[in-house]
Image (cartoon, rainbow, N blue to C red):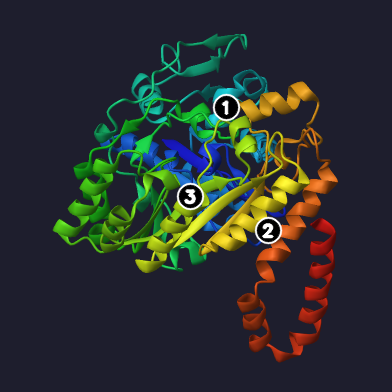
């Protein structure tokens, strides 16, 4: 029996391992936004399709603590435990693996993009028997069919008799994604996953992937590092088959597509949307793409096919900052047209920005904040530049001595782990606070809070005055 485990959350945090190209993020304890790593149900589905006994324990969805995981593994008598790890949760995940080893003496195999980037430190852990590098689906199938690690492409392992490390040759990424069975959500607590307001609180909610890889090489982005620069796509027919199965077979109400750039190939998106409409698939869905991929005609078609939201990266309003990270600026007029088209078609536009990129100054950051407020999409998110492993940004920050917090758990997109040439960590933190207040102090947000509780009026006035003083100082 192979047991695939998504470990319990670290103390005082929620671990979403599917974000940032699978390197993951940590959210504060109590966060409801929960995304299971997609490679877990995909791997389980591949094993099951070949008649191999497999179970999945997703502690995120089950809201299990370590003790509950150990009891379940002991009851199942798991011989091989495949543990999914991520960058910010790595230290905690290794402690979990160590306790599993002590309690059950099962074979421990660790996988995930973090392992691929840092194989040596992972395999040095005395309780880890093997690691899987790259995409895990076919590698775990190979392990199961061979009954061991010898000769399995994509596996590094320790020989039992002398602890010598054997490094098998790499496994190539899967080219034909249509060959993969649909993710085995029925083996997971998919009713518990939550996309909260981004998915309009619709449940059951799951994630899906219609492509892997990203041809763009943005310096801050983990996706091309993890999935490669070559775009590998599923056919529109295969994607719609999955959506139809999710809606009619599992009763799923909403899907978040996890593609790095969903609409890179316009014709494929049109094919998916037309397939949804032709078959009458009733599902709400959200995707992520670039603004330059969008136009009013495509947005209208996506809305008819059930799209409720589009996530789009703007990153900065400063052209030089964008050039520094290999991005092109989106002219404000073009961005406004896209946002207006989304609103016209009742699609929520979610725009991403990043504070503290190379070359960023306080003045350029304030221009980005002003850009975001003027654009006024449905949702705005300002994260901070984070040195994700393998990215050019991470290499740049390390070479310049700009990394202020080298703890893996600090690489979340929300903790300020690096400075840049012009701003200190404290200055970037101030910008984080300022943009949060700028977004929250929009008149309709204040009015909603006060009308919801009139007693808050005095505190809201004080908060507004504090923000205005900060705004005057900032500008």
Can you tell which of label 3 and label 2 is closer to the viewer? 3
Q: Position of residue 403 (x, y in %)?
A: 78, 32
Q: Position of residue 254 (x, y in %)?
A: 37, 61
The residue singled out by tag 1 in the image is: 115
Mark drawn on residue 312 = 3
In the image, residue 80 sits, relative to residue 260, either above or below, namely above
In the image, residue 286 sits, relative to residue 323, either above or below, namely below
How far apart in space, not on screen, are marks 3 and 1 (Cα)? 28 Å
Query: Which residue appears at 41% of the width and 16% of the height?
Result: 152
CB atoms of marks 3 and 2 within 8 Å: no
**7 with respect to 174 (left or right):** right
Quarter holding the C terminus is bottom right
Query: Which residue appears at 40% of the width and 24% of the height?
Result: 139
How far apart in space, not on screen, are marks 1 and 2 (Cα)? 25 Å
How far apart in space, not on screen, are marks 3 and 2 (Cα)? 26 Å
Label 2: element kind: loop
196 or 475, nearer to the observer: 475
Q: From this viewpoint, is residue 32 visible?
A: no
């Amino acid at each position: 029996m192979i047991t695939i485990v998504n470990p319990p959350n670290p103390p005082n945090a929620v671990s979403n391992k599917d974000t940032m190209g699978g390197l993951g993020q940590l959210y504060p304890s109590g966060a409801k936004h929960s995304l299971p790593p997609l490679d877990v149900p995909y791997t389980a589905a591949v094993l099951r399709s070949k008649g191999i006994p497999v179970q999945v324990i997703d502690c995120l969805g089950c809201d299990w603590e370590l003790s509950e995981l150990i009891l379940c593994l002991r009851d199942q008598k798991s011989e091989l435990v495949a543990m999914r790890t991520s960058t910010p949760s790595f230290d905690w995940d290794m402690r979990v693996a160590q306790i599993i080893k002590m309690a059950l003496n099962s074979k421990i195999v660790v996988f995930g993009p973090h392992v691929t980037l840092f194989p040596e430190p992972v395999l040095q852990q005395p309780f880890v028997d093997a690691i899987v590098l790259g995409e895990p689906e076919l590698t775990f199938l190979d392990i199961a069919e061979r009954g061991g690690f010898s000769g399995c492409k994509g596996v590094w392992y320790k020989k039992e008799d002398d602890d010598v490390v054997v490094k098998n040759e790499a496994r190539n990424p899967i080219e034909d994604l249509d060959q993969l069975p649909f993710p085995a959500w029925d083996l997971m607590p998919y009713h518990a996953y939550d996309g909260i307001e981004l998915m309009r609180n619709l449940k059951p909610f799951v994630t899906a992937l219609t492509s892997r890889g990203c041809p763009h090489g943005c310096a801050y982005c983990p996706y091309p590092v993890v999935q490669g620069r070559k775009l590998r796509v599923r056919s529109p027919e295969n994607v719609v088959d999955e959506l139809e199965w999710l809606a009619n077979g599992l009763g799923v109400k909403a899907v978040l597509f996890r593609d790095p750039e969903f609409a890179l190939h316009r014709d494929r998106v049109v094919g998916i949307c037309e397939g949804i409409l032709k078959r009458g698939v009733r599902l709400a869905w959200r995707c992520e793409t670039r603004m330059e991929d969008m136009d009013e005609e495509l947005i209208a078609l996506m809305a008819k096919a059930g799209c409720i939201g589009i996530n789009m990266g703007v990153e900065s309003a400063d052209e030089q900052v964008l050039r520094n990270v290999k991005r092109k600026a989106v002219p404000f007029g073009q961005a406004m047209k896209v946002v207006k088209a989304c609103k016209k078609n009742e699609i929520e536009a979610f725009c991403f920005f990043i504070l503290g990129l190379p070359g960023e100054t306080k003045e350029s950051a304030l221009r980005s904040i002003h850009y975001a407020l003027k654009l006024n999409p449905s949702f705005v998110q300002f994260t901070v530049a984070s040195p994700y492993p393998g990215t050019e940004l991470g290499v740049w920050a390390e070479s310049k001595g700009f990394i202020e917090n080298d703890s893996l758990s600090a690489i979340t997109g929300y903790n300020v782990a690096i400075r840049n040439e012009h701003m200190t960590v404290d200055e970037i933190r101030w910008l984080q606070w300022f943009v949060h207040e700028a977004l929250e102090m929009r008149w309709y947000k204040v009015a909603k809070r006060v009308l919801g509780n009139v007693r808050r009026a005095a505190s809201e006035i004080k908060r507004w005055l504090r923000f205005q003083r900060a705004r005057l100082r900032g500008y």
